Each structure stands twice: as structure tokens, then as C-alpha cells.
Image: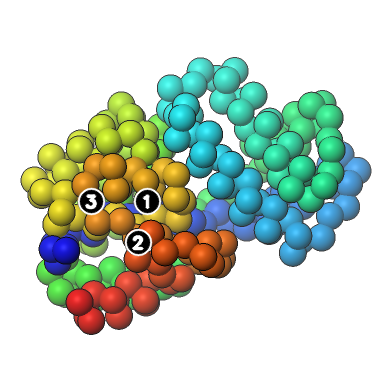
Amino acid sequence: MNKPTHILFDLYNTLFKFFPDREITQHQAFKSIGIKVERNLLKLSIGKADKWFASQTAKNSVHIMNKKQKTEFFIQYEKVIAKNMNLNISKQQSEKMWDFVFNTKSSLKIYDDVEDSFKFLKKNNYTLGIITNIDESGKELLKKLKLSKYISYIITSMDADASKPDPKIFTYALNLFNVPPDRCMFIGDQIDTDVKGAINSGLIPALLDRENQYSGFKDCLKISNLHELKNYLIAN
């Protein structure tokens, strides 16, 4: 395997998480329909629901959904979270939950290991970028996240008119960076969209499993934090 010169990252749950944490917001959403749930169980349920989310968006990207379809999709996501805790909620309840989540103010919070890892990677002459299934301009997102001293480009679904795992978004990124796929590593937290998308596009895949949801996964490099990425690159 060639040594990568470019390292590209997924965004959500890889470099950034929501603040307040999603389990806090979802806990309050359940309270809004009169259901009390344990936060520890809720965190696990959200992780499982994220796998469902990735498997569904791998087949039908949120990017191409209209407003009504997106709303219906996220209402179903709420039902999946509940089902993972053996709770059977009605569509009316899941609609109320999604309405609560959608209208709750949140921001993105960078993970503690990100900036140190970026400094290491830049010091060692890696070119860095982000590929994300966000329906927003990558240039605007780069300004918003204030990462331009580390990140060369952010490629979004809006930019590429495609979403992971579609090879089109990865090809768009490779052309932008002017790098062959076998010299580019892509790191993300989901198998269906991130790992399979990278493999099918010829990139070097890596799974970032921060919550140890994929303990038996061995199809590619798996790390639990970005410090492990530094160690891997040094050793290889």
C-alpha cells in the first residue's frame, strides 16, 4: 500500500460533535412526549440509529430529498432511536420529538484530539481536507469552522452534487486536490458511507470508532481516536 500524502476526513462524529451532546437533546425530546429514558441507553441507541441513518443515506442521499422527504426521514430516525430501546412510539410522538430536536439551538464542538493531530499532520507535510454530506457550500463551511490554517478544502454534497458513498463526491475531491486515490486516506465514523465509499473510489479507508461500536471490524485500519492515527503514520 502506498504511503498517503493527503488525508481527508468526515466531519460529524469524526472531527466535530454537536453541542449540547445529542443524547442530552434527545433525552429532552423524549421528555417532551412524556417518556423518561436513561441517558446511557440513549447514547447507545443513537449510535445504532446512526448506523441505520448511514445505511439509508447510502441508498438515498438526504441531499436530493425535498423538504417534506427530509422531514419524514428524520421523523423515522426518531422512531428508530426509540425502537433501539424497545419503545414503540407513534408517528405523532416522533413528529413532536423531531420538531423539538429541529428547533433546539445547537453548535458544533471540535473533539479534543483534532487540533493536535492536525498540527502533527501539517508539520509532516500531509495535505488535509474534509468530505461531508452537508447541503452547504464548502467554502462557507471552511470559514465558519475556522480551519483554513489546516484544511485546504471542504467538499460538500452541494459542491459535488453527490453524497457519500457515491464515488462522484470522492472523485470531485481527488480532482480538486489533484491527487491519485491510492495516495489519499479517508477517515470517517460510518462503514456504509465512509469506509465503503472510500474503498469503492480507490482511496485508503480508515474507520474512526470513537464509541467502540465496531469491535469486530477488521476490513481496514480502525482507530478509536486521532492520536492513534499519528502513531499509525509514524510506524508506517
For disc 3, the marked residue is 203
Give the CA separation, mark 1 to mark 2: 8 Å
Give the CA separation, mark 3 to mark 2: 11 Å
Identity, as a three-letter code, of the amino acid under mark 2: Cys
Q: Is residue 123 above or below residue 210?
A: below
Answer with the quarter of the image where residue 141 lies: top left
Give the CA separation, mark 1 to mark 3: 9 Å
Q: Which mark is residue 220?
A: 2
Name the residue located 82 percent from the left edge and 26 percent from the top edge: 92
Dot placed on the residue nearer the N-terminal end, 1 or 2? 1
Name the quarter where the C terminus is drawn.
bottom left
Q: Which mark is residue 195?
A: 1
Name the residue located 30 percent from the left edge and 26 percent from the top edge: 161
Q: Position of residue 198 (x, y in %)?
A: 30, 47
Q: Is residue 95 above or below residue 24?
A: above
Identity, as a three-letter code, of the amino acid under mark 1: Val
Name the residue located 70 percent from the left edge and 40 percent from the top edge: 80
Answer with the quarter of the image where residue 218 lies: bottom left
SS category of the residue bearing label 2: loop
Visible in this render: residue 139? no
Is there a contact, CB below 8 Å, between mark 1 and mark 3?
no
The foreground one among 39 and 229 is 229
